Image (cartoon, coloured by chain):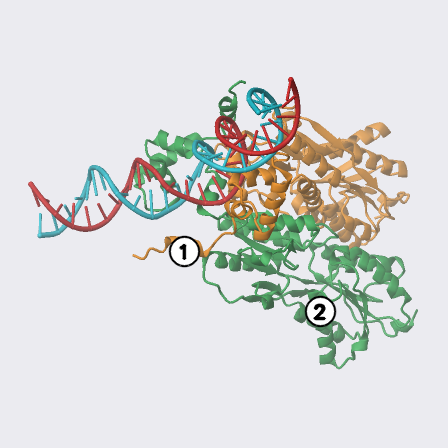
Chain colours: A orange, B green, C cyan, D red
Amino acid sequence: MVKKTKEMLDMEPSGPLMADVAKLAGVAISTVSRALANPGRVNEKTRAKIDDAAKQLGYTPNAMARGLRVGKSNVIMIVLPGSLYHGASQIVPQVLQAINVSLLESGYTLMIANLARDEASERHILNLAFGGTARGTIILASKLPEVDGRSLAHAGLPIVSMLLDMSASGVPSVVTNDREAVRAATAELIRLGHRRFFYLAGPEGNYHDIERFGGVLEAFQAAGLPETAVVRSGGKLDYQQSFEIGLRAAEEFVRLGYKPTAVIATSDDMAISFMSRIGEMGFGVPEDISIVSFDGSPVCAFCFPPLSTIEQPVEEMGKAAVAMLLDAIEKTGEPAPARRVIPSRLIIRKSMAMPRVGFHTSL
Amino acid sequence: MVKKTKEMLDMEPSGPLMADVAKLAGVAISTVSRALANPGRVNEKTRAKIDDAAKQLGYTPNAMARGLRVGKSNVIMIVLPGSLYHGASQIVPQVLQAINVSLLESGYTLMIANLARDEASERHILNLAFGGTARGTIILASKLPEVDGRSLAHAGLPIVSMLLDMSASGVPSVVTNDREAVRAATAELIRLGHRRFFYLAGPEGNYHDIERFGGVLEAFQAAGLPETAVVRSGGKLDYQQSFEIGLRAAEEFVRLGYKPTAVIATSDDMAISFMSRIGEMGFGVPEDISIVSFDGSPVCAFCFPPLSTIEQPVEEMGKAAVAMLLDAIEKTGEPAPARRVIPSRLIIRKSMAMPRVGFHTSL
DNA sequence: AAGTCTATGGCAATCGTTTGCCATGACCAT
DNA sequence: ATGGTCATGGCAAACGATTGCCATAGACTT
């Protein structure tokens, strides 16, 4: 039996330790620790000596050792609603981007907890939460993970919800004004003269669907239109299958006898595939049909024709979510679960126009 | 001076510990540890008792304590080339998705190290590497971060490069056949009758630009066309500004006297904005100009007209990269830096057609 | 010059796990 | 019945940092 343990370990040095820095600088380990972290506790000259030594050795503190000792990590975990790529919408990447920038500024690290929401992923998320890896959570457009009797709600972690309003369940939330934004877009279509609408829904009963459709109805009410002025399509598929939703909606559209003149799509992807398909079928946008959609994907500007869309303030929302989360992390006191609404903005492009008189009977 | 430390700490219990599980199960801590991790080292009955106790308490092992003790984490870090959202391309999200799925299956956790490549981000990446947070790295389409005299190359971490071939510098790489794919696409355009081309470049001197443009020239050579048969555009902006590249290229295109009949764009985003802009200017695709691009974004299918594109095998590439990385992590032996090429696939859609005779003189 | 105060540095315990080594008991063979 | 083997469980020392508490030295006051 060869005594190889010690030698083997020596082979992989895992870098210089704080003790090495201390030795080189000629001070105690604790002094190094304080010099590197605490302000003002260490003489300026000593600090300089230590900094030099650390730089010379290329010292990097071990994050796990520190985390273990202080009982907390500096990792913020993002829980995504599901798969990351579907269609052309960049909402999630944009949000991640904004969150990451804000977190970095505050010295935190972003960790993507999941890219799916199957059982294995949920378990994994909970392990990150309960295992002390994450210090806080931002959850995007979805309910809290829950499996094996454990729920993220009871992990003792600060949580902020984005895109989905969960403030009623006690989770601070950052959302946009889905309802008002859609109401405004609908009102604009009404103003242009449209009186008959086609609404492309996401999953039925979903928060966003309720809010957005509610916005349509509110606009109708304000204009004195009956609820029957809108035909709903979709409602079965998830937002992540938006291209398919748009295609099915197009099939449905051509079968309608008395055709709507305006389409309200609840995501850009739906609008894009819908517009493509009805284009192939000979309908023109905006001559025959006006379209407005939701998300504000950059690519909408380059569609044919350029697509009107409701731009979500993802960057501000991300910043706000991080601010709320850090606030909850740093203050121990339980603040009242807040709800922050950041308004969306309607971008009007060529896909919206006045309806052609008599169009809906022309086919 | 109130003695509050102990009480304060007790207030935030940070969940049950292994010791609690041991007590409840009536065994030693070490037995719990072995039961939960090692196979076969513990009696089946004991193990069952321990599992029960753990479940009953909702016990989750502390990842940092384990990581500290065993000297390694189970976090794989992804280094991105820069900002995550620009345009409609879903390459990066798709890759992340594929990587994440593969990693989860092997019990690893994915961590996005950065969403930008400024100095602060590079420093952060290196901290993650040298601070023991990451166990391995997958780097996407970019060079190794390097700052303050530290380089990712010397962090002692296994690294795999994706999309960019760095095998010559000793980094195992997973790439697609940029050159051959573009050669094939160009050859197809030549076969259709095109003899004069417009090439939309990414940043000049970039690996992808060299490879892709090389593919164009190879196709020319095979067909006996001179190198002057192609006009290069762009070369100044980054791939992340692809929409802008396409717009500028369109401006350039209209100013060309003797017009190309086919466009080879090195990203879908360029192609999309280019097509949109020249459409506004009265050029038709594919009647006046054929277009093919690179990336295989799903949205291309719904462009007007549907856009031919070279689809990168992102999913397979992601899987391959993870496989290579885990291999390097598990085997201690230094394997020869490998290079794995996974072929792309040309998707032909309506944006490619035979050139209209005499078009290039018609304006 | 002596006493007091403050700034700084050092010791050692601690975070929650893993794991080498040893002790114990069961089981088997002789 | 006795000795040997093996499976199992327990003790305690790590892993690398942080931090409460105390010691010390220098500055300041009178």
How crowded is the residue under tag 1: few (<14 C-alpha within 10 Å), some, or many (20+)? few
- Residue A26 is situated, as x and y percent measured from the top left of the image, at 53, 45
Q: Quadrant of residue A320?
A: top right
Reading the image, the residue beneath label 2 is B210
Q: Position of residue B303 (x, y in %)?
A: 76, 56
Q: Residues within 10 Å of mark 2 (few under 14, many from 20)?
A: some
Is residue A77 at least partly visible in the picture?
Answer: no
Which residue is rendered at x = 54% and y = 66% of the image? Answer: B338
Q: Is residue B277 visible?
A: yes
* Nearer the observer, A192 or A176: A176
Q: Which residue is mark 1?
A: A8
Task: Calculate the distance from the C-alpha at mark 1 to the C-alpha at mark 2.
Answer: 44 Å
Tag 1: amino acid: Met
Name the foreground residue: A50 vs B87: A50
Q: Position of residue B179 (x, y in %)?
A: 67, 70
Q: Is residue B200 above or below residue A27?
A: below
